[in-house]
Amino acid sequence: MIDRGQHELIQITRRLLLSRNRPKRQWLIERLGHIWSPPHIHHCSFVERHRKYLVHAIPTDESISAVQTFIADSHVNVRIAVAFALGQQTVPDEIAVRHLMQLICDDHPHVRCTAVHRLAYSPRLNLLDATDIERGLSCDTWTVRWTVASAIHSTDFANVEWETLVNSIPRTADFMLFQWLQYCMPYKARLLDDATLSSDVAERVRAIPDTAPFRDQIKDMANRLLARA
């Protein structure tokens, strides 16, 4: 007997194949992504209250193929949905990595950011080769570059990643500086060993005006990064 998850997977896939250039296609792709997600993954508080209505199923070749056909869709939110769906743990690694790396080069930064986060915080990060790393580090979107650099701090590419962060310290004391400090945390020991860089970071933080947005968050993050054990 077919279970509810398999039944909905088949139904949504069929609807998606008929939804070319229709607004509904974004929702259908996102729905497939939720169905593909492992049973223990929950995406919002609504899910917790309605857990009995959740269904899950292993991706089929047909459902994956249907989602893949929208990877170059003209609508940015559809491509973001594709990155979300293909980034699910149940999608075969070879397919997920290949398509997420393609989406990291997408024309829209939101698509690139979604793709890199689906890769950087999963075991698939270890499947990236030197070409993949270089592509991530050469991305025009700073979030993509810093996410890649921070995520693979313990790999053979760590030296290159650290150079990427060192050479891209934000000039302004805003949210970008807060993010930069956050992404540097895995490299804390390297930063503390570099007296010139540590001094530069501390000086930038001290110079933040009292009225600057994110002032307290930046100073707190800097204190954590520059604190010696």
Image: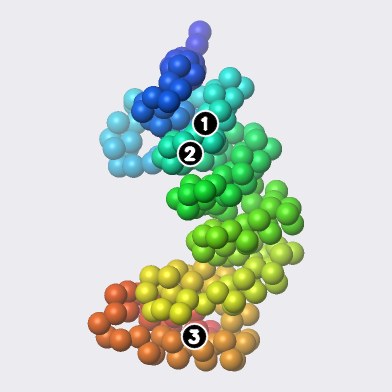
What amino acid is labelled 3 in the image? Val
Among the 4 quarters of the image, the one containing residue 25: top left
- The answer to whether residue 46 is left or right of residue 96 is left
Position above or below: 5 against 220: above
10 Å crowding of disc 3: few (<14), some (14-19), many (20+):
some
10 Å crowding of disc 1: few (<14), some (14-19), many (20+):
many
Observer-side mark, 1 or 3, equals 1
Which residue is located at x 36 percent, y 28 percent? 23
Mark 1 vs 2: CB contact within 8 A = yes
Q: CA distance from mark 1 to mark 2?
A: 7 Å
Find residue 40 and name its label.
Answer: none
Q: Is residue 35 visible?
A: no
- The answer to whether residue 220 is left or right of residue 129 is left
Q: Which residue is mark 3?
A: 201
Which residue is located at x 58 percent, y 72 percent? 165
Observer-side mark, 3 or 2, equals 2
Q: Label 3, secondary structure: give it.
A: helix
Q: Give x and y (percent) for residue 3.
A: 47, 15
What amino acid is labelled 2 in the image? Arg
Position above or below: 87 against 156: above
Q: CA distance from mark 1 to mark 3?
A: 43 Å
Mark 3 vs 2: CB contact within 8 A = no
Which residue is located at x 46 percent, y 22 percent? 20
Find residue 70 and name its label.
Answer: 1
Q: Give x and y (percent) for residue 213.
A: 29, 75
Q: Residue furthest left?
A: 211
Q: Which residue is mark 2?
A: 79
